[in-house]
Image (spheres, helix red, strand yellow):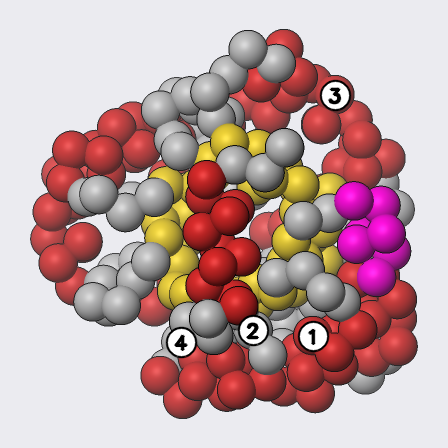
């Protein structure tokens, strides 16, 4: 059954209203600066994503709690590990790392999360997560011990996205990794968007307004920015 946050996202896609999520890594976030941080993010921000590949126990919950006191924006968890889950958020991107072949991130972490989720009020949104080469050895690659998909093999990216959709994903998330040297090529975004019929999220390496607009123009329904707002 589709929850309210996913239905709202679908409505925005139909109405061609582009979404903007700011990704907050609890490892790099100063809770004492929460109010100041929220004042400097773009006014058209629609979502706050909270998560990272390596987060100390309890940090995610503390960040979500601080954000909740200062913002009415929906807070989605973007967890690198089942231990990062907190019930204080609004929704959870239930990730499957489709670009890798490490069973721990295809099904292992998902099973470990169930004891926390089966009685939770969190809205759980199945998300096909695809790591694309952004020119750096990303923390996602290091933690999951997987390789990103190359940007020059568009067919592989398309087929991976479609496999995720066919397996039941409600979202496809193309990610170049935190601190990527360059974002995902517009051709990849446009071809994936043509192939799938579920919403498309694009993030990683998007630091400027023009890069964000290029992603939107190519078909991204939501753009995720993070590193640009961490300082």
Q: Which residue is mark 2?
A: 220
Secondary-structure class at tag 2: loop
Secondary-structure class at tag 3: helix
Specify the principal SS of the magenta part.
Answer: helix
Please tell me which of labels 2 and 3 falls first in the chain: 3
Q: Give me the C-alpha separation between circle 2 and circle 4.
A: 15 Å
Seen at 23% across and 34% down, the residue is 68
Please tell me which of labels 3 and 4 falls first in the chain: 3
Residues at badges 2 and 3 in contact (C-beta under 8 Å)? Answer: no
Q: Nearer the viewer, residue 8 or 199?
A: 8
Q: Give me the C-alpha separation between circle 1 and circle 2.
A: 7 Å
Report crowding for label 4: few under 14, some 14 to 19, many 20 or more residues within 10 A (C-alpha): many
Q: Which residues are magenta?
A: 162-168
Q: Give me the C-alpha separation between circle 3 and circle 4.
A: 34 Å
Please tell me which of labels 3 and 1 falls first in the chain: 3
Whether residue 107 is visible to the viewer of this picture, yes or no, is: yes
Residues at badges 3 and 4 in contact (C-beta under 8 Å)? Answer: no
Q: Give me the C-alpha separation between circle 2 and circle 3.
A: 30 Å
Q: Nearer the viewer, residue 220 or 152?
A: 220
């Amino acid at each position: 059954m589709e929850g309210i946050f996913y239905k709202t996202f679908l409505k925005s896609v139909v109405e061609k209203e582009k979404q903007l999520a700011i990704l907050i890594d609890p490892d790099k976030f100063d809770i004492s600066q929460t109010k100041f941080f929220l004042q400097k993010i773009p006014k058209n921000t629609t979502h706050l994503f909270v998560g990272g590949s390596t987060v100390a126990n309890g940090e995610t919950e503390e960040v979500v709690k601080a954000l909740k006191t200062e913002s009415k924006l929906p807070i989605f968890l973007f967890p690198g590990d089942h231990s990062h889950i907190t019930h204080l958020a609004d929704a959870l991107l239930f990730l499957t790392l489709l670009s890798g072949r490490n069973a721990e991130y295809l099904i292992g972490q998902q099973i470990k999360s169930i004891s926390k989720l089966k009685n939770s009020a969190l809205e759980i949104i199945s998300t096909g997560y695809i790591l694309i080469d952004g020119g750096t050895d990303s923390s996602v690659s290091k933690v999951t011990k997987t390789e990103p998909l190359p940007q020059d093999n568009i067919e592989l990216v398309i087929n991976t996205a479609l496999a995720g959709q066919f397996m039941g994903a409600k979202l496809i998330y193309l990610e170049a990794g935190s601190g990527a040297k360059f974002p995902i090529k517009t051709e990849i975004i446009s071809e994936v968007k043509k192939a799938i019929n579920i919403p498309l999220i694009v993030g990683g390496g998007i630091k400027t307004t023009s890069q964000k607009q290029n992603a939107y123009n190519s078909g991204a329904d939501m753009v995720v920015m993070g590193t640009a707002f961490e300082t």
